Amino acid sequence: MITFQQLLSSLKEYFTLHEGGLQYCTLTFFITFLVFYTVYILVRSGRRKVMLGYVVLFSIFYAYKANGWFMLLLPATTLISWWLTRVMQQLPDGKKRKALATVTVIIVLSPLLYFKYTNFAIQTLNNIIESNFAPMTIFLPIGISFYTFQAISYVVDVYKRKFPGDTTLLEYTFFLTFFPLLMAGPITRPQTLIPQLKKNPPMDKELIYSGLFLIICGILKKGVIADYIAQYNNWIFDDPTGFSGFENLMGVFGYTMQIYCDFSGYSDLSIGIAALLGFRLLPNFNSPYQSLNLSEFWHRWHIALSTWFRDYLYIPLGGNRKGKFRTYLNNFITMLFAGWWHGASWMFIIWGAVHGVGLMIHKSSKSWLDKLGKGVIVSLLSWFVTFCYVAFAWIFFRASSVENAVEVITRIGTDFSIDYFVPFINARPVWSVFIAVAFIVHLVVKEKTFYRMQDLFVRTPWILKLIIFVVCVQLIINFRLESVQPFIYAQF
Amino acid sequence: MRTDIKVLLLGLSALAIFLIYSISPLTIGEDDTEIRKADFIALATPSENAEAMAVSPADTIPAMAEETVFKPDTTPKKIFFFGDSMVDYLGRPFESYAAKNGHEIESVVWFSSTTQHWAQTDTLQYFLRKYDPSYVVICLGSNEVEARDIKRRQKWVEEIQQKLGDLPYVWVSPPNWTEEEGFTNMIKETVGADRYFESSHLSMERGPDHKHPTYEAAVGWMDTVASWMQSPASRYPIIMEKPEEKVRVTHLLMLKPYKLRKKKK
């Protein structure tokens, strides 16, 4: 039995401890959100500024739970970027305006470079000049990559006059600190969110219930499938030599599905929670493994990030306006940076390079590929090649080192036997069912079908919604058990 | 009614359902089909208490024992050694130790077994009746080191403890080859630090599967276990001097993997 004293101590601990933040698929977040939402319903119909202030305060608390006092970086970035952009916006076109925009971007980018890439730079330097500089103990604030990119998009869009610079400090703080976007995005453009802050969010039945539907999808993807299948995938990548080629291949396919369910599940939860609050965010994934080529994959995978890199790196580099060679090179450079953004490790850069090379190959052979037509066999082959290439690239993303990645590939190439199929299914029936169902649903459900299901859910009676929600949460309790796999993308 | 209020009510209703089920004595289903309960108690328990509870009183015993003149029990024991496939490796050198120190030993390897197998079948009672041991050694947990349902497994460890009753026993932890989620710590906390031999810090040569030690490496593992078994760090120190020569293995029984079936009511 829990005493009142213990309860008080727990509450004190809740408000003072800040390890890891409030992960979505936990009881703690569920209860916290219900308390927050109760007050939100009361304030949302009142004054707009009170509503915005309330959400900002909660978001700051949410950031504190994730990063402790390092969360102060967030209001600092907010204040500096807002003020400098405001000054820059009042300047006429010319060198001064450009210089101030550049300085603002550099200032906004500096904490990210310091916290995320200092040790990477030290280690690279040590390798190149054979020096012995000791790595520093640096805390990487959760979500810094995401809010930094949001701030940059605001500065650049105001500079290019694509977005008016009349955003108030409160609206801008809301935009940069909005808690559903804080830990792992999706990176949201000012054009998407800030205009919605100009008036109180509407009580749109369709939007709110669509949000609930997305939350349920997110729970199933992240809390049930990704967390469960991660266990086997971790064994494989921890020690690929201890498993057969077939098991290694299953580990690679498993990770391919895990990272999709993990991140798209997280995005669904974020977009869904924003929708419950009355804010409409853009989708971040569109069945990426249905893609028939790599260019299409990047139009469907982590859309917020790929469009960010397209608009703020690829196009400024020249995009496809400077001839074929420059187009391929720009693509490759963009993918290298996209890889590097994911983490301060050469493995992510290799992953980016693999995609860069793939995109170059696809673009250079596009005219030849188009001649093949769009028949069933060509489509199936295109899908198969694209999927295998994407899965192959994930090996470098997940492996701890080049040796580890090579080991996985070597085992698949040298120790593969289909005889393992039946024993594998017998030994890991639940894992196999999860993977099979996840792939089938992912590959079969088209965008239209998804929205039809969403509409059906919106029209479902309240009691049925409750039952569906309870069943999904119970699935997490049953499958996740004691511990939570952190969101893969939270570390970026 | 407004949609946002309806969604709030939905969330509160769901919370109430999980809370009521969590505190009710009723549990729906059993074993693999059990509908598990949300852990509201852990949520309301401050972690300082958890840390305090984690340090079991047994953790302090070796320190106290060091203050007195230490003598291991030199009387011959009837040792029953059971567990998973690791017993196949430890059990062989264990027989040499038993022969050297005048103990009798019976080892039972149940391949692929887990705490659940030994807790929820009558296999353990059968062998306890059959061998009537005066000392028990367990090496179990290799097939569940990555388990995340720690609390569930703790019940099975407790059931094994109950089956052993007053018999002196020690638990040799699996020689971990991977990071785990707290399974071996749970065993240590449940049985007590002085009944628990920690193998995870040992580095040993592994076989082709990278998990089991080689038979040669298992001899070194057994030497370390034996040294601990006769030290004051063990709650029941018995004589375990190192043998000069190997004996032929004759008391090692091997059981095939077994799939647990649902209990019939």
Image: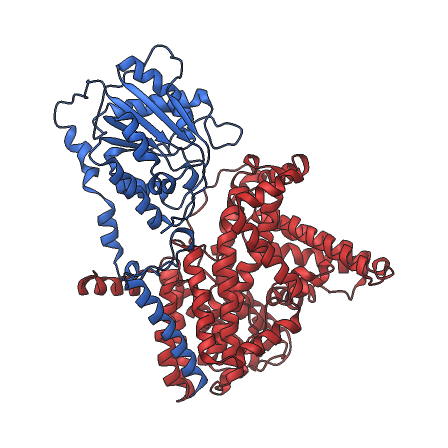
Chain colours: A red, B blue
Image quarter for residue A34?
bottom left
Left or right: where A310 falls relative to A276: right
Left or right: where B25 falls relative to B110: left
Can residue A111 be seen here? Answer: no
Q: Position of residue A455 (x, y in %)?
A: 58, 78
Q: Position of residue B264 (x, y in %)?
A: 38, 49
Image quarter for residue A18?
bottom left
- Residue at 63% across, 73% down: A95
- Residue at 49% across, 48% down: A231
Q: Toward the viewer: B258 or A117?
A: B258
Q: Position of residue A283 (x, y in %)?
A: 59, 71
Left or right: where A144 falls relative to B101: right
- Residue at 23% across, 29% down: B234
- Residue at 22% across, 18% down: B76
Left or right: where A127 falls relative to B90: right
Q: Position of residue A45 (x, y in %)?
A: 41, 88
Q: Toward the viewer: B107 or A387?
A: B107
Would you place residue B184 above or below residue A471 in this image? Answer: above
Q: Toward the viewer: B236 or B131?
A: B131
Can residue A259 be seen here? Answer: yes
Residue at the front extreme, as displayed: B265
